[in-house]
Structures are given as structure tokens and as C-alpha cells.
Amino acid sequence: MTFQGEGQLGWFFWRAAAEYSNKTALIDISQDAPREYSFRDLDDAMNRVASMLRNTGLKTGDRVGLAISNRAEFLMTMFGAMRAGLVPVPINLKQSKDVLAYILADSGAKAAIIEPAAGAHITDAAADIPLKFAFGEEPEGWLPFWKSVESSSASFEPLEISPDAPAFHPYTSGSTGRPKGVILTHLNTTWLIETRQKYWPAKPDQRGLIAAPLYHKNAMTVAFKPKIRAGGSVVLMGNFDARNYLQAIHDWKVTEAGGVPTMFSMLLKQQDLTEKLDFSSLQMLRLGSAPAHAELMNEISRVFNCPSAQGYGLTETAGGCMAPPLDGRPTPPSSVGTVMPGTEVKLVGTDGKESDRIGEFWIKSPANTPGYHNLPKVNAERFVEGWLRTGDILSKDKNGFFYFEGRVDDMFVCGGENIYPKEVENILLKHPLVIQAVVMPHSHPTKGTCPVAAVVTNKPEVTEKDLKDFTLQNGPAYAHPRRILVKDNLPMTGVNKVDLQQIKTELDQLELENST
């Protein structure tokens, strides 16, 4: 069977839409009452979005800012815009007005589709966009988006679009400066979807759960794309709430749930629900977007009585580049897996030489972005003869399994000793009552910098002294945290990662007890 939209991201589930048209594809529980959509419903809605947007005069390749909360309409709009040949720019709604305005201006957005109620600043940030649609309450001068969609045709023929044309245009979180626009082509993402389906196929009877923001790669890469491509289904939450998340697994018989490690640390604290609810439907729990320690992985598997796995990927690699080995060997709990077929990788040391053990992770893959938008100097630094320099430090064991060790710029020096935060976090996480740990450098009067930490524990009676003594007994003295902040929970960003900036502010305010 041939199909004109083959290889275009907007039509990635065309086979499932044809084979499972009346089957439930999406269960949206973001609103007061759950809403269920069949594959035909999703397909028709995306066609209506494409029809409406194409009729506005927007041209192939035009950028469209997309700022909608976690709900079915986000998915319909994003993939519908791609069907129309447009390039969605999915936006983190929790950014400041200045950052939102920068993203829209830097991307060159010709149109914006926003949900004013979903973000405090997005309406003002998009004020100068030529074509403005509002979803929900319409500010003066804005066009009604969903009303226009509903009155448009559900019939839309695929356009001729090159596989190398931009499909969507996300922005990185900007933790080290302004967000960087990443160009992802139709080939980048569809190659990743099809490769995973070929070697590690999702099945029509599987059901994923999404609570991470839809503008973030974790939600799309881990759950939505693979499940919908295979004819499975997805449950969509409006946001992450630990108790509601557990209840959703129970209520909707979810087979696979995913998220970032911070989310799972919070789930483990809901002992009354983890002991009461039925999680027997679960087949796999997947963690990504941040490193997960072996202790957390093992505890997750024990509590939910199912396998857990962590992945590794970047926005720049369309969300993924590692996977379980094809020969069926079990992946160690702290490993991010092995190299995906069709991908080349290497580890490069600080001396610029390739290493068999540890170094900066370089990757060459069909999923690699062709480059950053409007950043020629950064492109020259990060892309070398087809290789993407990720800036991440990974190690590899003798069996070919890779492990995330930190960022190139994470390392700091304490009294002449090189320290990576993750090595100190690993020591803290060996403590039986520590479930989460973050380590950072702190200025020191004699050593230049020293480690300090923030941790979450299972028992409130665990003291800072207990933990400092534990690190001294279980690791090198130079690496022990000079101060440890014990917290109920670690703060999270809009994409449910640990808010490192907020923690840094808290840790910077601590006074060192001594100068050892």
C-alpha cells in the first residue's frame, strides 16, 4: 500500500488510522470529564486543522507558535499543522514573557495558536504576531481557533514535502542561557519512530500514560508516538500530580508509564496508594530526560512489580539514541542501554582522543538535527564532520552498556581533585533512606570549591550529620558534601525536572560549618 504522506511526521500513524479507525486512541483526562477519541477522530481533527490553516494563506515552511496546555487539542493542532506543511514551534508555557517573546521572534513565527488561560504571559508575548488564533477565551483582535477548525473540512490530501524539510522547531530549556531553536526534520523523527517499531515494537493492546508537558520530548517520544503508531492507546493527564498519576494507572489499566526521575521519586512517597491500588496491568516503567540512579530504578521495580528502564536522548536527536540490546541481554539498572541500530557513537576524552571507557558522547545518526536555528557559531562548535557533540559525559562498560556520568561543564575541582556531581550523588543514594540527591559546587575558603547537596529521604529523622558521616564512610573524603540540605521534595521546573537553579540558590545561602 502506497501513501503520499509516507515519511511525513504529520501522518506518522496513517497505517493505524486505516486499520484501527474505530478503536480508542486517546483518553483525555485533563478536564473534569474524560474524553475518548478514536483513531478516526484524531485523523479527522488533524485534517480539519490542516484544512483551516492552509486556507489562511500560510505557506509551506512557515513557523506557527503553539502554546496550548496538555489536552487533546494540542496533539490535533501540532500534527495537523505539520500536515499543512507548516512548522509548529511548541512553547513552554511557564517561561517568562521575555523568553516567550524571544522564541516567537527568533523562530520567525508567522502565526500563533495559544490558549490564553494556560499561561500568564503568552498573550502579551504574541501580540506582534501577524496571524493570531486563540483557543478558549479570545482576547480582542484574536481569531477563534477551534471554532474555525470545527467548521473546516475533515478531508485533506497529503502535500509533497521533502523528508529533509523542517517538521517542527522546539526550543531547548535554556538552562545555560537563552533557549536554542532546534530544527527537526520529517526524516529525523520518522526514522526514529520506525526504527523503534522495527526492533522493539509497541503493540495494539498497549496503553501509555502521559503527564509530562506535551511540548517536551519525553511525552511525545516515550508514549504518544510509539503507542499511536502501533495502534495502541494513550491516557493524557493535564499535569503531573503523584496521587492522580497512580490512580490513572489503576483506573485505565495502563501498561506502560513514563516520566522523569523526579516524578517517580514523588510516586514512591505515596505509600498508602502504592499499597492499595492495582498496578498489575503495568508491563514497563520508563524514565528519561534526566539520569536515574540504580537505587531508584530498583525501588521502582520492587514497588510496582514490573521492569523499569531508563533512556537517553536529546532534543537534538529527536528524543532518543539508546535502546536495549537486540540479543535480549538484561540492561543494568543504572545504564541507559546500548547503541541503536543505524547509529554511530564515540566517546572523546579531554585530550581530543577517542576513549573506550569514558568521555564526551558524540553521535552520528539519521535522527540528528541538521543544526540550531540562527546560531552559526554554536553549529560550528557542536557539529563536526557529521558528528553531534552532545556535551554529555558517558561511560561504557566491557559489555557495551552506556552510563550517563554528567555534563562536560558539570565537573568542578575541590582542593585539586576533579569531582563530577553524579559520583557524589551515587554515594548518597547508597544510603537506604535517601531516594533523591542533587550535588553542586559551593565556594570554599581554602579549596576553591567543595560539594554541597540537597536530598529527599524516606524518613524525616535522618539528619545532615548522619548523611555526612555516611558519605565519609563510603567514598573519598575530598568528595563528601560539606553541607547537606534535607528536604521533603525537590522543586521542579515546568517539564518536571529538578529545578537546579532554585536548589543552587538555596545551597549558595548555606554557611560552611568548617573548612575541611
Image (cartoon, rainbow, N blue to C red):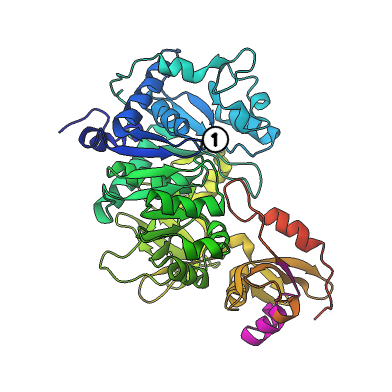
Q: Nearer the viewer, residue 69 or 376?
A: 69
Q: Where's residue 362, x and y in %?
A: 45, 58
Residue reaching furthest to the left = 1
The image quarter containing residue 255 is bottom left
Q: Which residues are magenta?
A: 467-486
Counting labels gives: 1
The quarter of the displayed image where residue 34 is located: top left
* Residue at the (72%, 54%) spot, across then down: 502
Q: Please identify the residue farthest to the front as the structure is shown.
A: 276
- Horizontal and vertical percent for residue 380? 53, 46
On the rendered image, what quadrant is the C terminus found in?
bottom right
**Which residue is at 46% across, 52% downward?**
388
Q: Nearer the viewer, residue 183 or 52?
A: 52
Q: Is residue 494 above or below residue 42?
A: below
Magenta-drawn stretch contains 468: yes
Q: Nearer the viewer, residue 123 or 421?
A: 123
> Is residue 107 one of those drawn in magenta?
no
Pointer 1 residue = 69
Residue 511 drawn above or below residue 17: below
